[in-house]
Image (spheres, grey):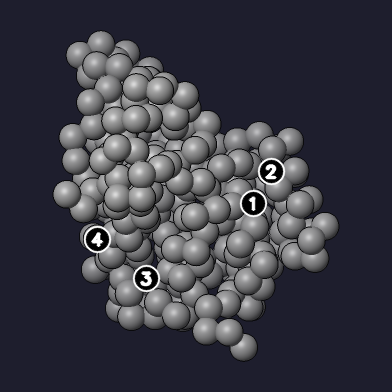
Amino acid sequence: MALIHLQDKVAIVSGASRGIGEAIAVAFAEAGAKVVVSSRKQEGVDKVAGRITQGGGKAIAVAAHVGHVDQCQALLDRAISEWQQVDVVVNCAGTNPYFGPMLTIDEGAYQKTFDINLRGAFELSRRVTQTIIDRKGQGSIINIASVAGMRASPLQGVYGMTKAAMIAMTRSMAMEFGSSGVRVNCISPGLIDTRLAAAIVQSDTAREMVTSRAALGRIGVPEELAGAALFLASDASSYVTGHNLVVDGGLTIV
């Protein structure tokens, strides 16, 4: 069997109806995992789960708004009801409803950004970890952060705040959960062609500012995050925890 595989593992992927989450969910299924495809809208997750099952993989679609604690718990309950356990969580659900100065963001946009980007990942991670501890198993939590959490991000300040906090949360959880057999790591993408990044990708000026500084000189696509997630989810990374794996085409190396 290949070194990197997810045979016999059950994975929850939030934010999996499109973009990075969809790419990761599909890659996990191809690597042998049973995948719980989750996002806010049932139609979106049905489409991705259907794509997986039509390709011979195993997946169920569960609509859940991770910004609500009760829905995080319901998502976990459904996964365990279907497949008795959860081994891997990818916290990919994210939002960036406001693109502009921090001086003028309204309270609603601020709270929504924190609830979805940070609170959802926190709540789902600790709930899944407790089930892994209870069954004396091994697990991997993967948080999808951003290079916006590593450096100043003008016009995306609050989004960057949530991602910086996610990176800090990853390190603290790694220390707290490590002795229980649960690894916690982070992936920080650069500019990826997704709906979330549309404000930058669709602006010639903003896109050029990013790509001109990146070593590879281009933006990324969602599938280019899947390999990093697959590595961190698999036993190939069994001695890796608390790490922030940057996948940015060389944007942050200078």
Crowding at mark 3 (Cα within 10 Å: few <14, some 14-19, many 20+): many
Q: CA distance from mark 4 to mark 1?
A: 26 Å
Q: Position of residue 23 (x, y in %)?
A: 59, 52
Quadrant where the N terminus sits is: bottom right
Sequence-wise, the earlier of marks 2 and 4 is: 2
Tell me the tag on residue 183: 3
Tell me the tag on residue 45: 2
Tell me the residue that label 1 is attached to.
Answer: 37
- Return the residue nearer the eye: 226 or 81: 226
Element class at badge 1: strand
Tell me the residue that label 4 is attached to.
Answer: 171
Q: Is residue 4 above or below residue 55?
A: below
Crowding at mark 2 (Cα within 10 Å: few <14, some 14-19, many 20+): many
Count of residue discs: 4
- Return the residue nearer the eye: 152 or 53: 152
Q: Give the residue type at disc 4.
A: Arg
Q: CA distance from mark 4 to mark 3?
A: 10 Å
Q: Are marks 1 and 2 in contact (CB under 8 Å)?
A: yes
Q: Position of residue 48 (x, y in %)?
A: 71, 47
- Residue plotted at (25% across, 36% down): 161
Query: Is residue 173 in sight in this rendering?
Result: no
Q: Position of residue 19 (x, y in %)?
A: 56, 42
Element class at badge 4: helix
Q: Are marks 4 and 3 in contact (CB under 8 Å)?
A: no
Sequence-wise, the earlier of marks 1 and 3 is: 1
Element class at badge 3: strand
